[in-house]
Image (tube, grey):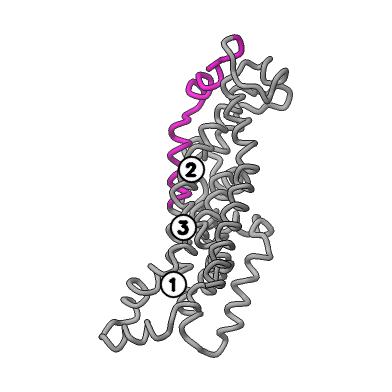
Amino acid sequence: MNRARTSRLNTVAAHAALLAWTAIALFPVFVILVNSFKTRRAIFAEPLSLPSEATFSMVGYRTVMAQGDFLLYFQNSLIVTVGSLTFILLFGAMAAFALSEYRFRGNMLMGLYLALGIMIPIRIGTVAILQMMVATGLVNTLTALILVYTAQGLPLAVFILSEFMRQVSDDLKNAGRIDGMNEYAIFLRLVLPLVRPAMATVAVFNMIPIWNDLWFPLILAPGEATKTLTLGSQVFIGQFVTDWNAVLSALSLAILPVLVLYVLFSRQLIRGITSGAVK
């Protein structure tokens, strides 16, 4: 009885803490959205106030739609993000299942090798990556970005998913084998449904850095046809003059898809983060 009550209290506390941190994290987003509908003078004079009849302006959104191909940039970012997350979750789950389920010589070393990718930033190898993409003819293609982001996200995905997969009951998997299920069926029908919170957590942790990244799009895909949303927004930032109305409007439009995906994954994300606190 006391254990159940303690578990409920831990769950409530974990949810409250997560909601508090979410509110703090969303405050800058609120400021950007509010100021995107204001005149330039009002942005600097009253940055925290809501738009009024005198300060309301849509000039930033009109500028964004008139200059550059914003819809193409949005499409490129969506393709790169969705494609990268698909490969990260697919290959990460497969590698995590192999490391957690099968014992073989070098299992621990393989896990440590993959974990090194979390500690060593992939940007250190930018020159080598660029040379590789030039040699394979993938410069100025979305494929280059998808490959790089997949390699960037796999170490964290394997690390998180393997820990969750080790908690899946061996009795459940052995029962599936007795019933005639092969290893692929056990992986797809038994293990993956039980680690959905972990997969949602991996997706959210990788989605935001991929969507907001400027470094690799600038290096690998700077062409007009392959620009991402973040790179396309840089056209409004000059060396001497910056169109703040357009910058804030472009950032507001770029934030919306991330918020939508966060809301879709939020329930599974909370379960994945708090699962260890409510046992």
- Pick whichever of labels 1 and 3 is earlier in the sequence: 1
| Res 193 → quadrant | bottom left
Mark 3 surroundings: few (<14), some (14-19) or many (≥20) residues within 10 A:
some
Residue type, numbered disc 1: Met
**Residue underneath mark 2:** 77
The residue at the point 60 percent across, 40 percent down is 26
| Res 38 → quadrant | top right
Residue type, numbered disc 3: Gln
**Residue underneath mark 3:** 268
The answer to which of 201 and 120 lies nearer the viewer is 201
Residue 9 location (% of width, % of height): 58, 61
The dot on residue 94 is 1
SS at badge 3:
helix
Query: How many angstroms separate mark 1 from mark 2 (CA)?
Result: 26 Å
Residue type, numbered disc 2: Ser
The residue at the point 43 percent across, 46 percent down is 79
Residues tagged 3 and 2 counted as in contact (Cβ below 8 A): no
Query: How many angstroms separate mark 3 from mark 2 (CA)?
Result: 24 Å
Q: Establish if 227 lies above or below 244.
A: below
Q: Establish if 29 lies above or below 261.
A: above
SS at badge 2:
helix
Mark 1 surroundings: few (<14), some (14-19) or many (≥20) residues within 10 A:
some
Q: Establish if 116 lies above or below 222.
A: below
SS at badge 1:
helix
Mark 2 surroundings: few (<14), some (14-19) or many (≥20) residues within 10 A:
many
Which residues make up the magenta segment?
54-82
The answer to which of 176 and 65 lies nearer the viewer is 176
Magenta region includes residue 246: no
* Nearer the camera: disc 3 or disc 2: 3
Residue 200 location (% of width, % of height): 47, 58
